[in-house]
Image (spheres, rainbow, N blue to C red):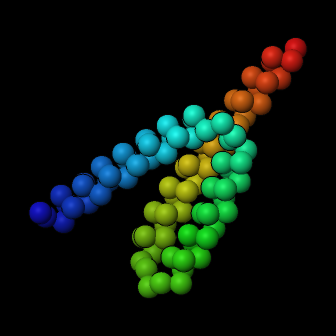
């Protein structure tokens, strides 16, 4: 396998895992708790990565994915809050 093929393979795995995460997030019964836990575990994982010899690219990739997933969690919570307010009206 060439280096490009390896990178393409990893990108495919990340895309599949991201899709799985979004599906789980969308069906989670308590999005606020999920968001809080995502932040906590994300911070723990960042600490683990920073304590090991890693490349800047790995850290940037981890940060970017965490930010994307947290943004989705925020959007999900906002949609739920908006629906809840509409149901009350």
| Residue ranking furthest to the left | 1
| Quarter of the view holding residue 63 | bottom right
Q: Nearer the viewer, residue 77 or 2?
A: 77
- Residue 69 vertical position relative to residue 3 in the rendered view, above or below: above
| Residue ranking furthest to the front | 29
Left or right? Give the position of 31 relative to 5: right
Residue 39 drawn at (x, y percent): 66, 59
Q: Nearer the viewer, residue 82 or 32?
A: 32
Left or right? Give the position of 14 relative to 62: left
Residue 20 drawn at (x, y percent): 44, 43
Left or right? Give the position of 22 relative to 11: right
Residue 70 drawn at (x, y percent): 62, 50
Q: Quadrant of the C terminus?
A: top right
Q: Quadrant of the N terminus?
A: bottom left
Residue plotted at (66% across, 48% down): 34
Left or right? Give the position of 76 relative to 15: right
Residue plotted at (49% across, 45% down): 21
- Residue 76 vertical position relative to residue 85 in the rendered view, above or below: below
Residue 75 drawn at (x, y percent): 65, 37
Residue plotted at (36% across, 45% down): 16
| Total numbered labels placed on residues in the image | 0
Residue plotted at (42% across, 70% down): 57
| Quarter of the view holding residue 40 | bottom right
| Quarter of the view holding residue 56 | bottom left
| Residue ranking furthest to the top | 89
- Residue 31 vertical position relative to residue 66 in the rendered view, above or below: above
């Amino acid at each position: 396998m060439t280096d490009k093929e390896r990178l393409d393979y990893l990108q495919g795995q990340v895309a599949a895992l991201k899709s799985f995460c979004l599906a789980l997030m969308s069906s989670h019964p308590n999005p606020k708790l999920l968001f809080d836990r995502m932040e906590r575990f994300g911070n723990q994982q960042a600490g683990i990565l920073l304590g090991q010899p890693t490349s800047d690219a790995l850290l940037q990739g981890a940060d970017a994915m965490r930010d994307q997933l947290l943004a989705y969690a925020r959007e999900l919570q906002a949609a739920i809050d908006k629906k809840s307010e509409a149901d009350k009206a």
